[in-house]
Image (spheres, rainbow, N blue to C red):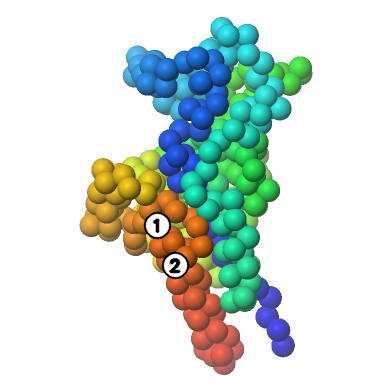
Amino acid sequence: MARNPVPVAIAYDFDGTLAPGNMQEHVFLPKLGLDARAFWARANALAEEQQGDPILTYMHRMLVEAAAHDIPMRREDWAAHGAGITLFPGVETWFDRIGAAGAARGLAVEHYVISSGLRELIEGTSIRGHFRAVFASGFLYNASGAAIAPAIAVNYTTKTQYLFRINKDALDLADNTAVNAYRPPESRRVPFANIIFVGDGDTDIPCFRMVKEQGGHSIAVHPDGDATRAARTRRLIAEGRVHCAVPADYRAGAELERRVLAILDLLAAREAVTASMPETQA
């Protein structure tokens, strides 16, 4: 009897992982004529002064600056900015390739984003349709459809919540009952052993550690040719936080693809062994 494909989740950070730098610096800040360093300095200074969350203060600064420059901030305006985000090499074709590779191994590969960036900008990117869910910071909107305040902030510690949402298939952010409800590990839709997390640095450390310690696979990426960032990601290996650190090159045949395909081979082999065991032993 044919078995259903086994769900496998790959969760990605966005900034520095799928796209270079911070997403706000691709279109939004240049359109307003704002210097990126000055923008982040003001946002971080506000967080320090008010003892607030830097994610909330950068979102607040975006709304303040947009209003000061008379730039509309409706959902479609954010999406237009997101459409201008540049992605790392190979990202555009990555999801179809990895999905096909998974299917050939009897695996159903799903893709997710867990990011401190803005879901509104991600919605405008060419790759949005490949994600089963996007967990990212986002705004509240008034009756006219304009962003008026932060609605959700995803920071480096709250990112781990979304791994449990993937694990338990509790994707509705307004429903906290499902994500907090007890479910035995064997009844969860995507076991942690079948989760791969791809990130780029310190803000991803809680996710790196959780996935790795729960039997999944953590991969750190860095811009190809950036020796400083490469050294930082290699440090994560030495600290036991990730399994490997590779360039953020998503093209066919690159090291990142080879690593992920090896993980899919491992998961497929593990499933084949389990399937061949008598029911009383499995």
Q: Residue at x 71, y 84 (%)?
A: 2
Where 204 falls versus 70 (above or below)? Answer: below
Task: From the viewer's side, name the closer residue of 132 and 230.
Answer: 230
Camera-near label (1 vs 2) is 2
Q: Residues within 10 Å of mark 1 (few under 14, many from 20)?
A: many
Q: Which residue is painted at 59% across and 63% down in the image? A: 97
Q: Residue at x 38, y 53 (%)?
A: 247
Of the residues shown, which amino acid type is indicated by label 1?
Answer: Ile
Q: How far across and down, in percent of the image, does residue 67 sit? A: 59, 10
| Marks 1 and 2, the one that precedes in the sequence | 1
Mark 2 is on which residue type? Arg
Q: Quadrant of the N terminus?
A: bottom right
Where on the picture, by quarter, is residue 80?
Answer: top right
Image quadrant where residue 79 sits: top right
Q: Quadrant of the C terminus?
A: bottom right
- Give the image location of residue 112, x and y in percent: 57, 51
| Residue 243 appears in the rendering | yes
Q: Evaluate if marks 1 and 2 touch, with contact meaning CB atoms under 8 Å apart.
A: no
Q: Position of residue 227 (x, y in %)?
A: 27, 46
User: How many numbered badges does the structure rendering display?
Assistant: 2
Question: Label 1's element?
Answer: strand
Tell me the tag on residue 219: 1
Q: Can you give x and y, in whole percent of width and height, for residue 107 in the image?
A: 60, 71
Q: Is residue 65 above or below residue 278?
A: above
Residue that numbered label 2 is attached to: 258
Pick whichever, 235 or 203, lies toward us. Answer: 235
Of the pair 177 and 79, the residue shown nearer to us: 79
Q: Is residue 217 above or below residue 72?
A: below
Residue drawn at the location 43% of the way across and 36% of the way down: 21
